[in-house]
Image: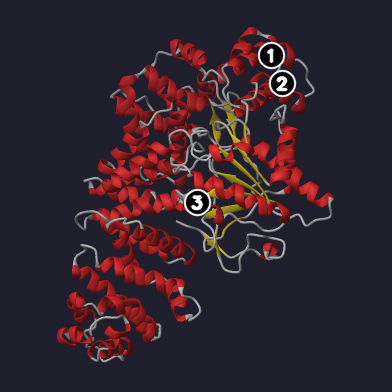
Amino acid sequence: MVAVSSPPPSQDNRGLNPLLPARRMLVAQHAVGGDNIYSEGDTNYTRIDASKLRARRVSDVAVAEAVASSIVEPEDFEEWKQTLWRRGLLVLRGPDGIGKSTLAVRLLSYCQKKLDEEGKPAGGSWLLRTGWEEIAAREIPSAPGASYLLDVSQSDDIPKAEFGEDLIRDSDFNRYDGVFLVVITTPEVWQECHGVTAIVTRDVPVPDPYAVTMERLQTITDDNRYESWLADLSFQALVTRLKQPSEAVALAKSISSALQREDAEEAKQSVLDEFQSWRSYLTTWFKKHDSVPERAALVAAAVLDPAPPARMLDARNELLREIGEPEESVGPLSGPGRSGYLVLLEAGSVDKGFSISATRHGLDEAVIIFVWNEFPQMHRVLQNWLIGLAEGAPSHVVERVAHITVKTAIRARSNIFLELVKKIVLERQSSYALAIKIIDGIVLDSGVGAFVRHRLLQWARGANEFLASFAVDACSHTLLQERPRIALKRIFEGLNRESPDSGFRNAQKVLLEVSKDGSAALIVCDVVAEWLSQDGGNAGVKAFLVINYNVPAVLLANLADASNASTEEFFRKGWSAAIGSDVDRSELIGAMRSLIDVCNKCMIPPSVVMRIVGPVLAESINSDVAMAALRAKDDGVADPIRDHLMRELIYGDLASAFGIGVEEVVADA
């Protein structure tokens, strides 16, 4: 769910922090995509009342890391600096994973230093990420002296040309206040804006993987034997297959580690195996070990890595049972023993047992991919076995199974994990937590995340109520934290189901739970209002009615505040849309009665409620709703709002206030 926190005392300096408002904030727990350009200690605040963006301060440590990183600067990087300084805006285009974020931080750091040199206030650098399908330039912060990095590379909607025009216009003014903005994007996302922003758009070249590897090695090791390694034809072929700078950096790190091993040839081969998905190594191992129990032991060790021997043996026997093979004896003195299994699996001893990837990085994930590709008859067996491992298991085991499943799917570029999730939801509910963990781990992945989000949307709309209920649940975790509008759209679809099944009820439950938090409630209302204004169908209306059944405290506080008109307008427009929809009148009546009850309880002035529901109650066509919603309760408790509305309705003041014929209303009353 959405995590909310008050700003820590150390951060409570609003004169220096251009994004820290006075009220509580929505805290985004994780950032996705691009390079890790900020430290774990950074605090991420979202100003949801003034912006549809989430912001995180880029720490001094992270800036230093970006400046010192192995990302090679383009030849015309100096010109990029001058363009940003002169115009206040620069757009960096390029595919994911080539270092755009790191280059952007370097550019913003340059601007901050220039401001400092000129004796002007420098408000630091801030990373902005979109949590919505569409943003407007006016929502981008512009605190004097602050530099911003806007990442739209993962946007589900393509920004319109008007967005680019607004950025150009605003940058002309913001530049004089020391405000600088770097936008990072992909050619696909920026296609409509490119024409109007071409003058400040720069295409980031894909770095040469060999240069990145070499430069990184020069930084992290003094052992110059890496030069002869990279001159080897096998390594040259490996480097040419690298597609992203991050892969080149990982290769350099692996070489640096391998150089410390005694057997140089074995160390070189281990690096080659690691970056070739250990295919050669595993082919040899499986050829050498044709015993099914031994192979099952390797698969079990890969999934649970690291694991105590006893737990690995239990998992191996569960896999053997799933295959239909006889189990090996698990008596106190059976098997080759701890040392024997270390030799068999060529594993390393670690604190939690032993690990096959302790000295062979990535081997655990490679084993599952290898078995999946080489033994297609194992697909169903593996699915059932993985689900069984998570049933009733401790949380760390569930997380590990989900992790290995997600990592395997990403590396294999496969969506087969969705079949595993579907099987859990429909057949193995006892492993429900595993399904949620799998979706959480992959829903924001740059490669298959969009496909996952689309599938969740299909499930929320589909005929199967259990898949719909799961889709709603899955959207209320990581996706809601990182991409709230995308998540809420799918939750709303659960409300739009034809019958009040478990998918519908779960959507109601999740929406009510989300709305309990003040910051999240404002997000929900913003999205509901957008859906209602864009003719979002009954889903928007039903979401609005859910809010009326359990009005969040923050909205009640706003209604009681005479100076806050936005919440009052939200309810007034919502009821105007609801009364004109084809939602059953009984639902409208129930929601309105609930709204009036809670407003009575919280002593909201009757005049406020009259301005909200008066326009719809004054219409003669809605007399059935008016009479049912205003019918007095039999509990003997004072009911000032209903008394006020009924009096105004009968005497015609309500109608005249909204320009409706008095005779018509009185006759209906």
Residue under pointer 2? 214
Q: Amino acid at mark 3?
A: Ile
Tell me where residue 448 appears, x and y as whole percent.
Answer: 43, 34
Please tell me which of labels 3 and 1 falls first in the chain.
3
Residue under pointer 3? 135
Identity of the residue furthest to the left in this view: 667
Q: Amino acid at mark 1?
A: Leu
**Which is nearer the eye, 30 or 378?**
30
Q: Nearer the viewer, mark 3 or mark 2?
A: 3
Q: Residue at x 73, y 38 (%)?
A: 81
How crowded is the residue under tag 1: few (<14 C-alpha within 10 Å), some, or many (20+)?
A: some
Instruction: Please determine whether, in this image, residue 643 is positioned above or below residue 580.
Output: below
Tell me where residue 564 appears, x and y as whole percent.
Answer: 49, 76
Query: On the picture, is 595 further left or further right than 500?
Result: right
Residue under pointer 1? 230
Quadrant of image for the C terminus: bottom left
Let me know if residue 25 appears in the view.
yes
**Which is nearer the eye, 335 or 446?**
446
**Mark 3: secondary structure:** loop
Dividing the picture into quadrants, the one containing residue 505 is: bottom left
How crowded is the residue under tag 2: few (<14 C-alpha within 10 Å), some, or many (20+)?
A: some
Q: Are marks 3 and 2 in contact (CB under 8 Å)?
A: no
Whole-number angstrom distance, CA of label 3 to CA of label 1 = 46 Å
Q: Amino acid at mark 2?
A: Met
Q: Residue at x 45, y 53 (%)?
A: 484
